[in-house]
Image (cartoon, coloured by chain):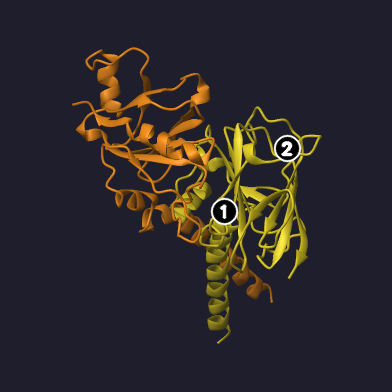
Chain colours: A orange, B yellow
Amino acid sequence: MIRTLLWFIGGALLGGIIHIIVILTLPLLAEETTWTRISAYEAANRMLILEPVTPGIPNPLHLDPELSYGLCQVDLSEGPAYLNGVLPDAFWSVAVYDRNGIVIYSTTNRDGIGQTVDIGIFNPAQTRLLAQQQIDIAEGLLIVESGTNDLFVLVRLSPPHEAMRARFEAELAEVTCGPRT
Amino acid sequence: MRFVLRLLMCIAVALAVGFGLSYYALTDGRLFGAVSLGPWTTWPEIGSPAPNPYARGHITREAALQLGRSEGLQFVATTDSDEAPLNLACSYRIAGRVPVSTFWTLSAVDMDWVNMAAPGTDAALRSSEIVRQSDGAMVIHVGTGLRPGNWLELAGGGDFQLVLTLYDTTALSSFASADMTMPSITMEDCR
């Protein structure tokens, strides 16, 4: 009886190890990730407006029907990425995601930026050059440091009313994104 | 013979515990980083730049565009306040207050995140469109049957989940007051 109990406890301990391995390797083994879904959009170095959510149509990215989304994929190996433009006077927020779909940086327009988006994203080597003043940047640029090169930026913009959506999305599409040419 | 039986039991227990616990941690996850407030559940770690392994697993499993920590928090309810699954055969009443936020949206989706709003109506309700009670509390009716007041009109059948997204919120942050309350979900009647 005691021996059976010991085997049982051994099984439970082994289960704990399996659990830890599953949790830690899941992000590495997943085939369909945020990154593969985003890459299907062809949004490299441009601000792409995502289709609004329609009832009855699948919504794999879990978008909010009330919001407008601008998506831009950047590769810092091409140089620092800049996000620049003026957005309408309504709630908006910017999030920078890495390859794993983790938000490495996010901010909203309530953080005192006003209506102007002016963000530069740098990898560690570019940040070093920045500190040595070897990269010229404009004053007031919001600097985001990223550990990896493959990133995407998502701008969430909230039109207060459905009638404003078209105009707001047109203004959002004007935002430039990508390396400085 | 005994040894083989014990070995088989050991393996069965290991597999059941290992994969069962992992599945639970990434779906319900209340013991592993998900926070429940009444029927509403959220993963506060999901928007942080260095999420814990469970939140990381959840991000991978959802493969969606999560909200950053400063952008807001998304709460999902799959049951009403009495822990009965939300079903489109019934209508529900959402009453109470939400934590401080710039604005919030409420939508209904099925288990695959397909929006369930009736065709031709708003796909989601927004805090600025809501008529409130005189004390500032809100009452929202959700369901397929005609309802007075604030009504999120749905269509279709089967189980569904409610998604309440708070933008720019202090909920679950260090600024939040201790008495965080979320609205209750009460079943009204069923067809």
Distance Cα–Cα, label 2 vs label 1: 31 Å
Which corner quadrant of the image does residue A83 belong to?
top left
**Secondary structure of the residue carrying numbered label 1:** loop
User: Residue at left 60%, top 54%?
Assistant: B29
Q: Residue furthest left?
A: A181
Is disc 2 surrounded by few (<14), some (14 to 19) or many (20+) residues within 10 Å? some
Residue B150 visible in image: yes
Quarter holding the N terminus of chain A is bottom right
Quarter holding the C terminus of chain A is top left
Chain letter behind tag 1: B
Chain letter behind tag 2: B
Q: Nearer the viewer, residue A132 or B162?
A: B162
* Residue A122 % position (x, y): 30, 27
What type is the residue that disc 1 sits on?
Thr
Name the residue tied to disc 1. B121
Q: Nearer the viewer, residue B85 or A87?
A: A87
* Residue A146 % position (x, y): 35, 31
Q: Nearer the viewer, residue B38 or B87?
A: B87
Reading the chain from its start, which is encountered first: label 2 or label 1? 1
- Left or right: residue A75 versus residue B109 is left
Which corner quadrant of the image does residue B146 belong to?
bottom right
Q: Which mark is residue B180?
A: 2
What type is the residue that disc 2 sits on?
Met
**Secondary structure of the residue carrying numbered label 2:** loop
User: Residue at left 69%, top 62%?
Assistant: B145
